Amino acid sequence: MNEQLPVELLNDAFNVFRDASKKLEEQYALLEDRVDELSQELAEKNRAIERSRRLSAMGEMAARIAHEIRNPLGSMSIFATILERELVADPEKQRLASHITTGIKNLDNLLSNMLLFASSPEARLKSVNIRSVIEDSLRLTRGHERSDVSVKAEFCGQTTIMADQVLLRQLFLNLLINALDAMDEGGTLNLRTRMVHDARSYMEIKVSDTGRGINEEHVDRIFDPFFSTKDRGTGLGLAIVSAVVTAHGGFIDVVSKPGEGTIFTIGLPASREYRI
């Protein structure tokens, strides 16, 4: 019996060693897998950082180019307007000149979107009449207006809020152009403002159209920069809308049905401190 004891102890020790070795191998395999996962995550983060650096550089370059283009564009706009007035006796040539003006306005809107996107807009708050801003934006849609589209605006109650007039004008211009472009077969474009008093007071603005609508799988992406369902769209218009709303501390919701139209609901705080 005494002679067998060392053998049994050796067997037990061997079994313990074997089990320990097996567990170590399993832990080592798990560590290898985890190291691979961390390496992949690190590589993805490095690629994301590099993309961010490239996008930042592209944004700075786009902003510089936009400023350089805008200077001669302003002169072109003045000359085109003068040309339109001079050609009042020749409607056909005046119509051609008006195309130049429209093209310049479209370019100016594109440049404004690029500059806002590159600079991350910050709202400079002053007392603003939302009715005046919307009416100005409607006038700026010249070139996109449609004889088969009826535009209706309704302003209920108070129309003055604390906001950035320049940013809001760009917001509404983008929304209006987007709505007009969506109505291939004509329809109705409605704008309605009203003051809402819930937990906090805010200005509610609804912009609705009877256009082609947005497919359900695209609704969650429409505010993403560079996402567009148009063949020639830049994908910045609605991204700027979202950025301007965020800069004002507001909210934006969208409801859309393909073939029936889209409703954008924007909420902007009614009163905030002056920030110039």
Image: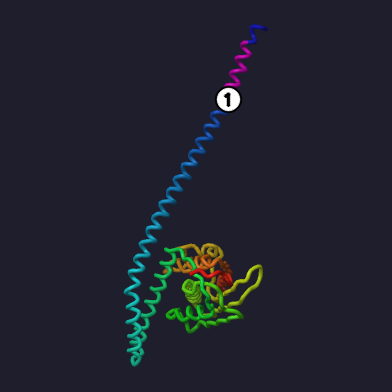
| Residue ID for mark 1 | 20
Q: Is residue 136 visible?
A: yes
Give the residue displayed 46% in from the left and 48% down from the top. Answer: 45
Looking at the picture, tell me which residue is in the foreground, 129 or 275.
275
Report if residue 14 lies within the magenta region.
yes
Q: Position of residue 43 (x, y in %)?
A: 44, 45
Q: Quadrant of residue 260?
A: bottom right
Q: Secondary structure at mark 1?
A: helix
Q: Position of residue 167 (x, y in %)?
A: 48, 71
* Three-letter amino acid code at the position of disc 1: Ala
Specify the principal SS of the magenta part.
helix
Looking at the picture, tell me which residue is in the foreground, 202 or 38.
202
- Position of 236 with respect to 91 (left or right) is right
Looking at the picture, tell me which residue is in the foreground, 78 or 217.
78
| Residue reaching furthest to the bottom | 89
Looking at the picture, tell me which residue is in the foreground, 20 or 193.
193
Q: Which residues are magenta?
A: 6-21
Q: Is residue 267 visible?
A: no
Give the residue displayed 54% in from the left and 71% down from the top. Answer: 213
Assign the N terminus to one quadrant of the image. Answer: top right
Q: Position of residue 95 (x, y in %)?
A: 37, 85
